[in-house]
Structures are given as structure tokens and as C-alpha cells.
Image (spheres, grey):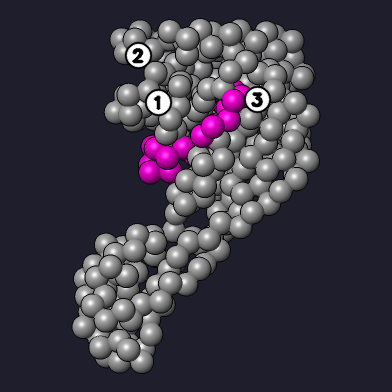
Amino acid sequence: MRGFKISVLSGKGGTGKTTVSVNLAKVLNNSVYVDCDVEEPNGYLFLNPQIEEEKTVEVIIPEINSDKCTLCGECVKACRFSALTKLIKKILVFDHLCHSCGACFEMCPYDTIIEKYKPIGTIRKGKAQSVDFIDGKLNYGEATGVPILKEINKLIENVDKPVIVDSPPGTSCPVIHSIEGSDLCILVTEPTPYGLHDFDLAVQLVKQRGIPMAAVINKAGEGDNIIEEYCEKEGIKVLAKIPFKKEFAEAYSKGKLLIEVDNEVREIFDKLSTDALELIKK
């Protein structure tokens, strides 16, 4: 099977995107599962990978050479993230606010700022039987996981396998970086008014990026029509409906894949993978 990238996202956390991502990666034999939810990665709990490599991700932050600094304040003016402030006798750096944009380095007229490397998280690579595993984890208190996502994108940009990306929740900047270069986005939602609200936010984001999309309704049952009517209006295909069962919640809490505990769900994911590939081929 040739390489392609499917990103699984939702408008908010707790909707079931990790459930869809890990089960889809498993039914697509010889695939790559990538957990981009760097603030709270949990795909490893279900795939139980054997970690083979771990890499620290660093960013560059400014360090002010007080002996050369004239306190002109140009670096403070250049910083859009308020990571620098001018005191009476020194420039103070709030490194947890720094986005490593480099503006302060560029604007300093006296070459006073020194590049300092700071670790912000890690990337792990491993193997979960037939599935290649990658996840990123942001250290507590760091401003953004985008540098980690950029490093992950470098790892998968030329992979000749199906790549399933478990995107961060929401519709913010990290989600945009995680779906970059996708052949298809699968949006997971629940059939409730709140689910529809967040689903709509995700739909608008994917529309803006010009990426083909499809939907999966998780915890399907009463109220499915609220999502199906929306999808029909927006021209979005509903690829699968995963029923709501108490047994699924128990399996999730024990870190089990749904396809391994329920034959009906196994068939749902087999068809989901086939239909997703058909959409990518179009």
C-alpha cells in the first residue's frame, strides 16, 4: 500500500479521535501511527509500542549579554509575545513565553543577544507489532508544542506507508501544523448540539486548508440526524458510526482496542479504511 496521510481530528477533546486513530492504524496493516496531541499523548496506552528511540526537542531562546547591552529596548519592542521586558538595569527574559521567532536577535543593533538552547519536549519512535509508532510530548509549562510538531512532520514527510495522525484537540495552531500535507481529514464528532458546535469549527478549519474531509460519528444512537443533516448540507460523507455501548467504555478504560473486543466494530473499521482509501483515490 502506497504512502498517504490521514489526519483524525475533532473540535474538542474527549470526542473519540484517539479511539478512531489507533483502531484505524491497526486495521491498516503496515501503517504509521503518529500521536500529535503533544500536551496529552495517550495513543501508546492502546498500542503498547516497544520504544526504540527517544529524541529531545530543543528551541532557541535569547540570553542577554549584560556587559554589552545598552538597554536600548529594541528587542523588547520586537517581541510579539511579551517574552522580554526592560527593567532599570537589565533586560529580563521570560523564556516560558518565548516562541523562538528570532525577532529579538534580528533587531538587536549591538549583537548583545546570545542563542541559548532549551529542551521543550521529546519525540519517541517505536514499533507496535505491524504499526510504526511516533509520539511527541511537550514538557509541562512550555508555551507551544509547534516546534515538536514541525520535527514530527519532517519524520513522516517521505514515508511510503499509510500515516494516521492523531491530531491535538481544538482548532488552534497545533492542529493546523498536524494536518499539514494530509490527503484526507477524518473529523470525529458526537451526535449532540455541543458536538455539532465543535464539529462545525473543525469543518471550517479544514475547509480553509483545502483538504478533503469525511466524518465519523462516535457514540452513535439517538440524535445522529443532527450530524447527518449537517453533513448532507455541507457535502461531507459520513464514513462510519460507532455505536455507544458500555462495553466500549470499559475496554477504553483498560487500554484495549475496540476492534479486538467487538466483531461489529472490527467490521466498521475495516469498511472505514476501505472507504477512506476510495476518497483519497478520487
The quadrant the N terminus occupies is top right
Q: Is residue 151 left or right of residue 72?
A: right
Q: Which mark is in front, 2 or 3?
A: 3
Depth check: give the residue in front, 157 or 255: 157
Magenta span covers which residues? 157-178
* Residue linked to disc 2: 230
Mark 1: few/some/many CA within 10 Å (<14, 14-19, 20+): many
The quadrant the C terminus occupies is top left
Q: Identify the mark nearer the N-term, 1 or 3.
A: 3
Q: Is residue 39 above or below residue 35?
A: below
Q: Position of residue 46 (x, y in %)?
A: 72, 33
Residue 50, magenta (yes or no): no
* Distance between the alpha carbons at the discs numbered 1 and 3: 27 Å
* Residue linked to disc 3: 31
**Quarter assignment of residue 82:** bottom left
Mark 2: few/some/many CA within 10 Å (<14, 14-19, 20+): some
* Residue linked to disc 1: 199
Residue 193 visible in image: no
